[in-house]
Amino acid sequence: MLETKVDTHTHSVLSGHAWSTLRENAAAAARRGLEGFCLTEHGPAVPGAGPFFLASAQKMLPGTLGGVRVFYGVEADIMDFKGGLDIDDKSLFGLEFVIASLHDLCLSPGTPRENTEAYLGALRHPCVDIIGHLDDRRTPSEFATIVREAGRLGKLIEINNNSLLIRKGSRPRMEEIIRLCGEHSVPVAVASDAHFDDMVGAVEESLELLDRLGFPESLVANRDLASFGKYLAVREARVESAWKERFGASGSIRRKGRLAPPGTPGV
Ligand SMILES: [Zn+2]
Ligand SMILES: [Zn+2]
């Protein structure tokens, strides 16, 4: 049976429609035996979400809570069919993990071609790591094109457990995505999309599905802190070089005093 020890998609009360605090999420993660989780609040375009500077405000938070590594991230909203996001560039560069999602609350979904272009544009931003809930039938897209491009860029595809629980019609779509990722050797991250502490790290339905489809364990990037750290090391090099290209300054400036190397307890 597959296992994942890092949950790459969680929300706290600061997302506006989630019910647990960061500390409660961390305690739940520890109870489940997780080694880490990504705090990925909604971007400001989601009604009730935090302010535009919330992503960068995470600098004030510790890097571990209750012995669990907390990676600071965001679930940014795709705002147009070119893949523009609702978080400013400098904030994106200061984060450790960035999900880009299409929410119909923020952008009325277009045709499958338009939605595909939106996803591709977001994926091409150097700080974006993963597309959130690609399976969502409200935002239909060309899965094969997106999976191949994620593979080319060294990015991840999300297996969102919440989709299997609450997004109608997601299961067969998720199966298709998993098959494509296997066929093209594109790594996935299995995530709860928790909006309540009991959901943190609860991804059994996704793991069962991956197991049933014979998905290779080696392509699950967040199976533990070590495997996730390997992804993050490659990511760090990509983001660092993009930072230098855009802002012409040293990469170390952007995260002064906050980011510990992946897997390091505490910062
Ligand atoms: Zn979402
Ligand atoms: Zn979410």
Image: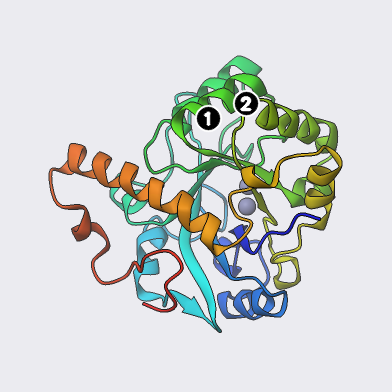
CA neighbours of label 1 inside 10 A, class few (<14), some (14 to 19), many (20+): some
Tell me if residue 182 comes above or below residue 4 in the rendering: above
Q: Earlier in the sequence, mark 2 or mark 1?
A: 1
Tag on residue 151? 1
Q: Eyeballing the image, is 63 above or below 73?
A: below
Which of the image's four quarters has the C terminus? bottom left
Q: Is mark 2 within 8 Å of ligand 1?
A: no
Residue in the image at 57% along x and 18% along y: 114
Q: Amino acid at mark 2?
A: His
The quarter of the picture where residue 264 lies is bottom left
Q: Do residues under tags 2 and 1 come within 8 Å of each other at their CB atoms?
A: yes
Quarter of the image holding residue 94?
bottom left
- Residue 146 location in percent, x, y? 58, 25
Percent across and percent down for residue 177 are 71, 31
Horizontally, residue 209 falls left or right of residue 6, namely right
At a point 65% along the width and 78% down the height, the residue shown is 30
In the foreground, 42 or 97: 97
Task: Give neighbour class at mark 2: few <14, some 14-19, many 20+ (Cα, 10 Å).
Answer: some
Residue in view at x 84 percent, y 31 percent: 172
Q: Which mark is residue 184?
A: 2
| Quarter of the picture holding the N terminus | bottom right
Task: Check disc 1 and give the amino acid type.
Answer: Gly
